[in-house]
Image (tube, grey):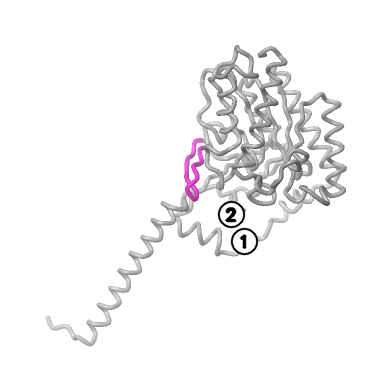
Amino acid sequence: MHVNPIIYAPMKFAMIVIAVTAVLVLALEACLRLFAGFGSPLIYIADARIGYLLAPSQRTRRFGKRIEINEYSMRSPAVAVTPPALRVLLLGDSVANGGWWTDQGDTISAILARQLSLVAAEGGKIPPTASPNVEVLNASANSWGPRNELAYLQRFGTFEARAVVLLINTDDLFATAPTSLPVGRDRNYPDRKPPSALAEVFSRYLRQAEPVPEELKAVQAEGGDRAGRNLEAIRQIQEIALDKNSHFLLMMTPLLREIGNPGPRDYELQARRRLAEFTQKQGITYIDFLPLFNSEKQPETLYRDHIHLSPTGNHFVSEALSAALAQLLRGSGGK
């Protein structure tokens, strides 16, 4: 069969272009998956009371950082069937969770577990009844506030933890009520895996963000005394912890702009005073990291952005928490 060379040459060129393009697309897809972790984001599930949770039992890597979510939607290994000698339950938002920018081993909970294990092994401040068998559970999610954390505790309980730790940041004093509206709508809260890594990159970075739904705007515009509602949620968290014979400890990290001068804004100072008075009234062990961060020569090294901590910051917080927990447990005779 004779093929006209005038027609065959363009067809051959087109086929070569298509083949080369396909190879490049596949190579780019593979690189995005292998080196950046695109195509496998963490998945969220909606919850009527908690608002949303990280879907249980998932594991991924983002930009080389390991992320593991256990069967209770915690950023922790699977919960031990038999409670260890020392179990701590950490509740928090993205600061406690660490997000995609923090490797599993560099989260506050992972660092704290190693520190407490060392203290126990060396016969330090943790009572002799404690052994190096330490477990720190990390129940947290991005943008959670005290009311989300309370709802989680009401759903799942304290897991027989000897201490319940609530880690908040200044913004959490003004957190709104739990809502599931962002799940599946906001690109940061996907409810399913994307068809490909390229599709995720396009959706996350190239496609224009969807407008904020009117219902979500209404939630974000919650009026009245937000700080008061969040303090009440903290009180209920303390109540649950004490009812389960757990110690309760509250910590608050500042925003980067609060460090140095001029310091917190007027409305933040007012909320901070309310929190300090509240903790005194409730007899809550409370660590305010603002003066501690201010005492550092280079406090900016404790942060990765305006609110989230760097691995250095996570170590700083974990060390302070480890010392406070050791003192609490020592004071209670190992209770």
What residue is at 30 percent from the left and 77 percent from the top?
14
Q: Is residue 176 visible in this depiction of the protein?
A: no
Where the N terminus falls, by quadrant? bottom left
Is 65 magenta? The answer is yes
Where the C terminus falls, by quadrant? top right
The spot of residue 316 in percent (x, y) is: 65, 37
Q: Where is mark 2, residue-wise? A: 187
What's the magenta region? 57-68
State which quadrant residue 109 falls in: top right
Identify which amino acid the numbered label 1 is placed on: Ala
Q: How many marks?
A: 2
Secondary structure of the residue carrying numbered label 1: loop
User: Is most of the magenta stretch helix, strand or loop?
Assistant: strand
What residue is at 63 percent from the left and 18 percent from the top?
126
Question: Whole-Å distance between the Cαs marked 2 and 1?
Answer: 8 Å
Residue sitting nearer the eye, 138 or 233: 138
Q: Is residue 104 visible in this depiction of the protein?
A: yes
Is 112 magenta? The answer is no
Sequence-first disc among 2 and 1: 2
Say whether marks 2 and 1 touch (CB < 8 Å).
Answer: yes
Identify which amino acid the numbered label 2 is placed on: Arg
Q: Where is mark 1, residue-wise? A: 209
Instruction: Give the class, few, some or many, for how many residues have Cα within 10 Å of label 1's Cα (few <14, many ≥20).
Output: few
Secondary structure of the residue carrying numbered label 2: loop
Instruction: Give the class, few, some or many, for how many residues have Cα within 10 Å of label 2's Cα (few <14, many ≥20).
Output: some
